[in-house]
Image (cartoon, rainbow, N blue to C red):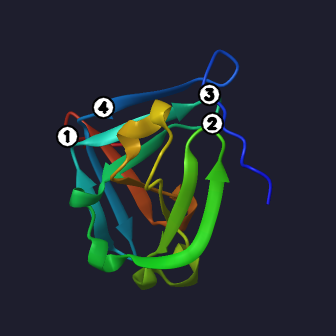
Amino acid sequence: MADKPVLQPGPNHPITITSNHNRVVVTVAGKVVADTRNALTLQEASYPPVQYVPLSDVDTAALERTDTESYCPYKGDASYYSIPVGGDSAVDAVWEYRQPYAPVAEIKGHVAFYPDRVDSIDIEADGDPS
C-alpha cells in the first residue's frame, strides 16, 4: 500500500479550532449521549463547523466501537463508534482521531457526531438551545 498523503492546513484549505463553552448536548433515541461546556469547534475549509466533545463528557457506555476507519490527509486516521440505542440510523455515528496530526492535535481525546445519525446536536448560547 502506498504511503498516505499528509497535507497541512493553509490558505487553500484552512482549519481552525476554537473552544466552545456554550452547552452542547447530543441526543439519540431520546437519550443524552453527550453533554459538555468544553467542546471544540473545528472549522475546516467551507465545510460546516463540527463540535468535538471531550470523551469525559460522553456516555461511553452508549457507544460501541466498530471496525470502520477512514483517513483525512489533514487530520489523520479516524475510528468509528455506533450508538446501538439509535438502531440502524446510528451506525458509525461517532468518530474519533486517536492520533491526530500536529496541526489539529487539540482534538485528541474528543469525538464528533454525524448530525444525520443522531436525533440532535443542540448548542445552547446563553441558555437558549439552537
Query: Disc 4 to disc 2, how far (Cα)?
Result: 18 Å
Q: Which residue is mark 2?
A: 47
Q: Which element type, helix, strand or loop, lies under badge 4?
A: strand
Q: Nearer the viewer, mark 2 or mark 3?
A: 3
Image point (36%, 28%), residue name: 18
Is residue 91 visible to the viewer in this orientation of the structure? no
Q: Which three-letter amino acid code belongs to the residue tagged 4?
A: Ser
Query: Disc 1 to disc 2, how far (Cα)?
Result: 26 Å
Nearest to N terminus: mark 4 or mark 2: 4
Q: Which residue is mark 3?
A: 8
Q: Which three-letter amino acid code belongs to the residue tagged 3?
A: Gln
Image point (42%, 30%), residue name: 17
Pinpoint residue 82: horizontal percent, then vertical percent.
48, 76
Determine the image quadrant of residue 55. Answer: bottom left
Q: Is residue 7 above or below residue 32?
A: above
Q: Which element type, helix, strand or loop, lies under badge 2?
A: loop
Query: Disc 3 to disc 1, how far (Cα)?
Result: 37 Å
Nearest to N terminus: mark 2 or mark 3: 3
Q: Nearer the viewer, residue 41 or 31?
A: 41
Pinpoint residue 118: horizontal percent, then vertical percent.
47, 66
Query: Disc 1 to disc 4, how far (Cα)?
Result: 17 Å
